[in-house]
Image: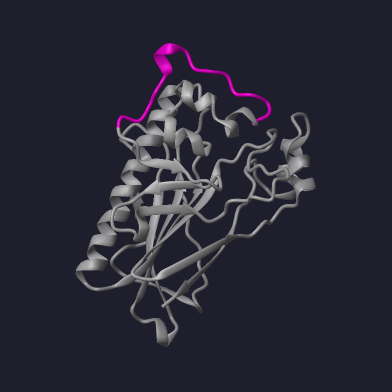
């Protein structure tokens, strides 16, 4: 199963250097891939700006599933490599750009930092998930050998990416109002879907756009009826996230 990228063709055009079918492979045994595309604004005053978009769909599976956790880490490594390749080309050609990496990561933020080791389950964000997630058996524990992610003081996921201004792709869809939020039906405080953004040679600001109200998240998170509500109201067991991304010269 692969992802799709939709865009407003009156505001953006696809560049030939990356096509919509250019997939970021996870590994030869994994069933899911992430699609990428290179876009440019059609506005005549932004001809020197490019936008690299990666639509993410990573391996599904609870944190107790060590194989799924490892595959997600491998996939994120591949995505980072692809982004860094693009950024290097931008810098070689003196091109300014924006990177947007978003979609279904199928993991909570803390997994990218700690894997599913004990430190993961000790995190406040993981302890808030309802229903609670079981711990892995010892043989299923996975922890990244080299750290590549962090949670910033506001609680946003940040993924290290060489060449990006400030060095990190930062979660632009983070909801920080303290009210109920979830992106997975039948769960509360269980966020698996993100939009990460970063700029190269230009200022990029992002602000979360909350599509579902706290009350709707409560309905979706109901352990008994949440899946039925989500399928009827959203058309998926995952709930949408969004971000308003603004770029400045």
Of 248 and 243, the residue lying toward us: 248
x then y, percent, for residue 78? 31, 44
x then y, percent, for residue 206? 53, 62
Q: How is the image coloured?
A: one colour
* Residue ID at (40%, 44%): 33
x then y, percent, for residue 104? 52, 45
Residue 143: in magenta span? yes
Q: Main secondary structure of the magenta part?
A: loop
* Residue ID at (47%, 33%): 111
Along the horizontal axis of the image, is 57 left or right of 226? left
Question: Where is 93 relative to 141, above or below?
Answer: below
Along the horizontal axis of the image, is 219 left or right of 88? right
Of 122 and 96, the residue lying toward us: 122
* Residue ID at (61%, 28%): 127
x then y, percent, for residue 118? 47, 20
Of 51 and 132, the residue lying toward us: 132
Q: Residue furthest top?
A: 138
Along the horizontal axis of the image, is 223 left or right of 9? right
Along the horizontal axis of the image, is 84 left or right of 70? left
Q: Residue furthest bottom?
A: 44
* Residue ID at (67%, 56%): 210
Magenta-drawn segment: 129-145
Residue 246: in magenta span? no
Question: Where is 137 relative to 161, above or below?
Answer: above
């Amino acid at each position: 199963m692969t992802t799709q990228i939709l865009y407003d063709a009156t505001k953006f055009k696809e560049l030939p250097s990356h096509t919509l079918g250019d997939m970021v492979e996870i590994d030869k045994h994994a069933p899911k891939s992430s699609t990428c595309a290179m876009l440019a604004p059609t506005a005549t005053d932004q001809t020197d700006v490019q936008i690299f978009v990666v639509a993410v769909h990573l391996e599904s599976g609870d944190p107790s599933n060590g194989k799924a956790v490892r595959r997600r880490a491998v996939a994120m490594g591949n995505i980072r490599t692809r982004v860094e390749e693009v950024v290097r080309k931008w810098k070689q050609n003196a091109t300014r750009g924006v990177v947007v990496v978003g979609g279904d990561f199928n993991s909570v933020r803390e997994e990218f930092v700690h894997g599913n080791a004990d430190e993961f389950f000790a995190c406040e964000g993981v302890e808030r998930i309802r229903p609670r997630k079981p711990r892995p058996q010892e043989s299923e524990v996975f922890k990244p050998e080299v750290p590549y992610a962090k949670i910033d003081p506001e609680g946003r996921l940040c993924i290290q990416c060489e060449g990006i201004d400030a060095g990190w792709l930062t979660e632009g869809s983070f909801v920080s109002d303290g009210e109920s939020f979830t992106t997975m039906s039948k769960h509360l405080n269980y966020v698996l879907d993100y939009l990460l953004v970063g700029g190269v040679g230009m200022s990029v600001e992002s602000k979360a756009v909350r599509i579902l109200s706290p009350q709707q998240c409560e309905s979706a998170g109901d352990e008994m009826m949440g899946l039925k509500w989500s399928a009827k109201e959203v058309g998926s067991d995952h709930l949408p996230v969004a971000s308003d991304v603004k770029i400045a010269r």
